[in-house]
Image: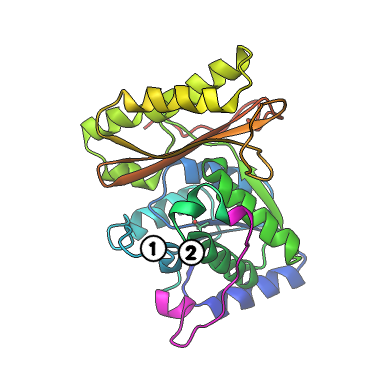
Amino acid sequence: MKTVTSPAAMQQLSLKFREEAKTIALVPTMGCLHAGHLSLVHTARATADILVVSVFVNPMQFGPGEDLDAYPRDSDKDKQLCEDAGVDIFFFPSNDAMYPIGHSSFVEETVLSRELCGRLRPGHFRGVTTIVAKLLNIVLPHRAFFGQKDAQQALVVRKLVSDLSFPVEIVTCPTVRDTDGLALSSRNKYMSTEERNAALCVPGALEVAEQAIRSGTSDARMISSAMQEALKRTPGVKVDYVEVVDPSTLEPIVAISGPALVAVAVRIGRTRLIDNRLIGGPDVEPPTPWLPPSP
Ligand code: PAF
């Protein structure tokens, strides 16, 4: 595995791979890799000649007072995990390389980005779309892989790529969960044992929604109230939002008659967690999801 830190060198390498008719897959990450990322890496590995994993904690997608400084970083471990997973290039640019002094261009998706997390994290998706556009231009991948846990991000990126005609296929991969149901996230590291136990109310609330919908409840307000109730029963949990939305527009659903995306964001102590479940739509889970080998 080669480590590349210069965006220009990365782009030159990718141009050479393309000249040699090699296919390139990109898994963009902010590092501190866990089994969720590794599942993207494994899926991506099978689809391309050259697999690039980028690790860059993008300051532009963090708001004032958010966890940019505290965000977990462990590039040595990340490199080892990538090497073991058969990654070809570990792209690890510095902040100055990605945003040199004077950087003044931004990419913004203006509709989907306003919903859900966009309401509470103004500027977040502008930061995501700007860095993703840059990474696509630098790495020039044929395919880029994103996790369904960040369902809104995956949708916003698909819209960006479609609206601005990036020649890349966006692949969304299923959420990887711990055995007790908690979705894997680098931010889970912030939580104490008690907070982690409390966090199980999030997959619990999604289960409440799934059961209600499967047993015929179509009133989305009733479903969000039942979820709110389930979340409020856990001490120390602050609900940012509970929403039942259209999976392609993210607009709130009033009466469920087709696929619905149920999305939750909560804060537990200093940790913000998001999770979602797609209910009644096409099955996004592959028949045999990749699971991390047991230690
Ligand atoms: O999902 C993430 O880790 C980040 O938002 C991404 C896509 C790498 C952009 O910084």
Q: Quadrant of residue 113?
A: bottom right
Name the residue rendered at 61%, 17% in the picture.
Answer: 217
| Secondary structure under the numbered disc 2 in the rendered image | loop
Binning the other alpha carbons within 10 Å of mark 1 as few (below 14), some (14 to 19) or many (20 upward) gives: some
Binning the other alpha carbons within 10 Å of mark 2 as few (below 14), some (14 to 19) or many (20 upward) gives: some
- Mark number, residue 196: none
Residue in front for this viewpoint, 230 or 24: 230
Q: Does residue 168 appear to the left or right of 127 in the view shown?
A: right
- Mark number, residue 123: 2
Name the residue rendered at 45%, 63% in the picture.
Answer: 61
Q: Residue 21 at what x, y percent from top left?
A: 77, 65
Q: Amino acid at mark 1?
A: Gly
Labels 1 and 2 touching (C-beta < 8 A): yes
Residue occupied by mark 1: 63
| Secondary structure under the numbered disc 1 in the rendered image | loop
Residue in front for this viewpoint, 245 or 104: 245
Image quarter where the C terminus lies is top left
Residue in front for this viewpoint, 164 or 186: 164
Q: Is residue 1 above or below residue 33?
A: below
Q: Amino acid at mark 2?
A: Gly
Q: Does residue 294 appear to the left or right of 116 in the view shown?
A: left
Residue farthest toward the top in the current orientation of the protein: 215
Between marks 1 and 2, how big is the CA–CA gap? 7 Å
Looking at the rendering, the stretch of residues picked out in magenta corresponds to 95-113
